[in-house]
Image (cartoon, rainbow, N blue to C red):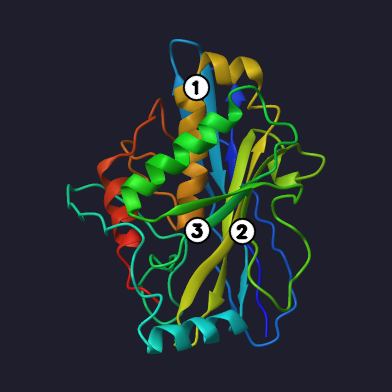
Amino acid sequence: MSRSFHGPVPHVRRPGPLIHRSRGHIRRTCVVVPHSIATLPPTRHTVGVSRSSTRLTFVVTAAMLAVVVAWHPAEQLETARRAIGLGDERPLPAPAVVRAGGAYAWAMTQPDSDDPVGWDPCEEIRYRVNPAGEPPGGRRLVTEALRRASAATGLAFADEGETDERPFPDGVELFGRPDPVVIGWGDQGEFPDLGGQVAGVGGAVAERDSAGRLRFVSGSVVLDVDAFTATAVAGQPRVMEAIVLHEVAHVIGLGHVSEPMELMYADNTGQVELGPGDREGLARLGSLPCG
Ligand SMILES: [Zn+2]
């Protein structure tokens, strides 16, 4: 009985010339695997978000990690609740899925199909923010990114307050309720994936439910204190917010695409809004069946 582990997607930033590429590095996280394992195919991508007005470029690199899943005891209870008609209503309505010709990709698919892994839209996505290292204005970036993600997905986020838990814990919880998504701030010393140009890392934890389907149940986002400085947040709030939103989209279940108009693009210049593919992908992830 247990679960865990994560799929970090590092995000990179580098001040300087406009066009930068960096190679993401793949780091595998090994976890105890009592029952089953689903492993994400490693991906190497880069994303750059640049603002010509300031000559500041942000590059985002993805490296999805191994995901270990197992049936969680809580799922059994949830299934029982649903069997008697409880717990099967969405807190928010499903979004309209608009096909506008954009590109999107899933961070993870079901083991036996191309169907995406996502969150249960009938459950709130619980999250906590660790304020250590948070720059002035940093919380607003998080709040706004989550608001935009919720609007695009119809998924509800429940703010469970602050925490001193760190993102991407190394430990494996064998029992108990999955931890909420932890959003925090850190540096390369604590999170090696933040090395080089990486400005953030986001990923989710999947578990196998009683029907054998993978579901995200927890996750983490860590934002680099060297990128999210007070100056950067004050001077380029939309860009910094876009990076947080990009990370949150990874937690929700989107991967990178090669379309420049998308926020999930692998080498973007100046994209701060969700593109048509981002929106379609997020709407589809938010429209998965409950349970
Ligand atoms: Zn990314």
39 shown above or below 11: below
82 shown above or below 40: below
Relative to 217, is 166 on the left or the right?
right
- Say which label, 1 or 2, has the lower sequence index: 2
Asked where in the image residue 290 lies, by quadrant, the reply is: bottom left
The amino acid sitting under disc 1 is Pro
Disc 1 target residue: 237
Residue 140 image offset from top left, x and y in percent: 53, 30
Q: Which residue shows up at 65% across the image and 18% down it?
A: 230
Q: Is the N terminus in the top left, top right, bottom left or bottom right quadrant?
A: bottom right
Q: Nearer the viewer, mark 1 or mark 2?
A: 2
Disc 2 target residue: 180
Q: Which residue shows up at 70% across the image and 81% down it?
A: 33
269 shown above or below 99: above
- Say which label, 1 or 3, has the lower sequence index: 3
Label 3 secondary element? strand
The amino acid sitting under disc 3 is Ile
What is the number of the mark on residue 125?
3
Residue sticking out furthest to the top: 53
Disc 2 CB within 8 Å of nearest ligand 1 atom:
no
**Alpha-carbon span between mark 3 and mark 2:** 7 Å
**Alpha-carbon span between mark 1 and mark 3:** 25 Å
Q: Around disc 3, counting alpha carbons within 10 Å, would you say few (fewer than 14), some (14 to 19), or many (20 or more)?
A: many
290 shown above or below 8: below
* Depth order, front residue of 88/265: 88
The amino acid sitting under disc 2 is Pro
- Say which label, 3 or 2, has the lower sequence index: 3
